[in-house]
Image (cartoon, rainbow, N blue to C red):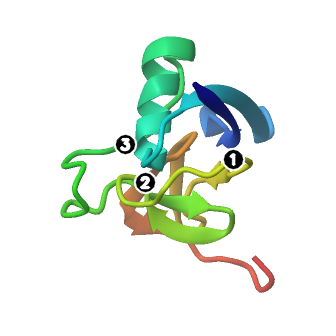
Amino acid sequence: MDTVTIKVRRHDPTAGEPPRLEEYRIPHQEGMRILDALLYIYEEVDPSLAHRYSCKIGNCKVCQMKADGKTVYACQERLQDGMVLEPLPSFEEVRDLVCNLHKRVKLMVGD
């Protein structure tokens, strides 16, 4: 089985530590989505990884995040080697890839 490496921005605002990129090397199958990779990491590698999903088919919109700087739905976007996954910058950060989608934050010019 092939493997891919992805980087996930990890951060717990309540811990007082700066954000960091954590690298994961995971098995890859043709057609995998970002959500598949996050579920694998959570279930098999690191259960402390915080991410959110609900429907797995793009209806609920709760799995939104940044992948290589582009806003995507994790359940719809195909996984690619070397991807960098981050939370949405315009919403209050809860932990790791989880944002409060009901609370926007004001971004500074250049963000």
Judge by depth and name the residue closer to the eye, 35 or 31. Answer: 31
Q: Position of residue 57 (x, y in %)?
A: 22, 56
Q: Quadrant of residue 111?
A: bottom right
Q: Is residue 90 visible?
A: no
Q: Residue at the spot x=22%, y=45% of the render? A: 54
Estimate the spatial distance between the alpha carbons at disc 3 and disc 2, rounded to whole Å: 9 Å
Q: Position of residue 40 (x, y in %)?
A: 46, 25
Q: Residues within 10 Å of mark 2 (few under 14, many from 20)?
A: many
Estimate the spatial distance between the alpha carbons at disc 2 and disc 1, rounded to whole Å: 15 Å
Report the disc number at residue 15: none
Q: Residue at the spot x=67%, y=68% of the render? A: 69
SS for callout 3: loop
Amino acid type, mark 3: Arg
Disc 2 to disc 1: CB gap under 8 Å: no
Q: Quadrant of residue 100?
A: bottom left
Q: Of the residues tagged 3 and 2, which is closer to the observer?
A: 2
Mark 2 highlights which residue?
74
72 vs 9: above or below: below
Q: Residues within 10 Å of mark 1 (few under 14, many from 20)?
A: few
Judge by depth and name the residue closer to the eye, 15 or 77. Answer: 77
Q: Image check: 82 left or right of 53?
A: right
Q: Of the residues tagged 3 and 1, which is closer to the observer?
A: 1
7 vs 2: above or below: below
Q: Which numbered disc, 3 or 2, marks the residue that appears first in the sequence?
A: 3
Q: Image check: 106 left or right of 59?
A: right
Q: Residue at the spot x=65%, y=30% of the render? A: 3
Q: Which numbered disc, 2 or 1, marks the residue that appears first in the sequence?
A: 2
SS for callout 2: loop
Estimate the spatial distance between the alpha carbons at disc 3 and disc 1, rounded to whole Å: 21 Å
Mark 1 highlights which residue?
81
